[in-house]
Amino acid sequence: MDIPIERVQENYDRITDDEVGEASAEFASRAYACREATPEDLIKAMRLYRALKQVCEEEKLTAVTVSCFRLMEHTQTTGCLAISLLNDEGIPAGCEGDLQSIFTLLAVKTLTGNSGFMANPSMLDTRNNELILAHCTIGTKQVESFIIRNHFESESGIGIQGILPTGEMTIVKCGSESLDEFYLSTGTLTENTNYINVCRTQVRIRLNTPVEYFLKNPLGNHHIILPGNFEKVLNDFFVANSCKRIE
């Protein structure tokens, strides 16, 4: 379902600051810290969350992906908080209108019961077979703690810096034009990094398959991370649906 962005904007304009004040304060109270973002930034981001949630409820959406940068033009805030909270509520939500990633997030949620973290490969280390994946939003239920930041690329609005538990991870992406190819690997999250030149939530993962995949012909930019080893159930699902595994 393609929903006009103007509908979200109209909802946003109708929601007042007072309506989201209590929810904003409650969210801030759960954060480990707050850095660049202001209370006014948080209020705007919470209004956008409410606006998106209204659409999800009215249309009975089971997943949603958002054209983040177009929304910023009107609301002067980012969708990072909204996407985080929708994922917390069990509605897989993704960024940048990425339909392949939201399908992967929905498959992951359905098959494993867990929410995934949609992230960009940001740094690669072929010598140690490691990569750093990062994005400015993650569900707060997926992390041990989180810091309220601003959005990295625009230096505005709200971003979420989540601290994930170390341990075994699964990375997956279903892609290509017909959703008939998929990438799947396990690895170990060894560190939550804090580089200044990539998105706010950052994890270093040592892969069990060659990291060179990300240098050759990856299935797009965004990939989905989830804690634990779900290689068998995900592989069985995609193979049963005639998808080809890419390595």
Image (cartoon, rainbow, N blue to C red):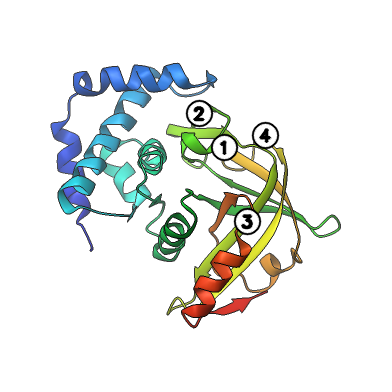
Q: Residues within 10 Å of mark 1 (few under 14, many from 20)?
A: many
Quickly name the residue at label 4.
194
Q: Are marks 3 and 4 in contact (CB under 8 Å)?
A: no
Quickly name the residue at label 3.
170
Residue 56 in percent (x, y) is at: 23, 48
Residue 64: quadrant of the picture: bottom left
Residue type (three-letter) at the residue carrying disc 3: Thr
- Figure quadrant of the C terminus: bottom right
Query: Furthest-right residue in view?
Result: 127
Task: Say which element carries label 3.
Answer: strand
Spatial separation of the CA atoms under disc 4 and disc 1? 8 Å
Spatial separation of the CA atoms under disc 3 and disc 4? 22 Å
Quick check: 93 above or below 127? above
Quick check: 131 above or below 241? above
Quickly name the residue at label 1.
200
* Picture disc at residue 8: none
Residue 205 in percent (x, y) is at: 71, 50
The reply to whether residue 155 is in sight is no
Spatial separation of the CA atoms under disc 2 and disc 4? 12 Å
- Figure quadrant of the N terminus: bottom left
Residue type (three-letter) at the residue carrying disc 4: Asn
Quickly name the residue at label 2.
149
Q: Are marks 2 and 1 in contact (CB under 8 Å)?
A: yes
Spatial separation of the CA atoms under disc 1 and disc 3? 20 Å
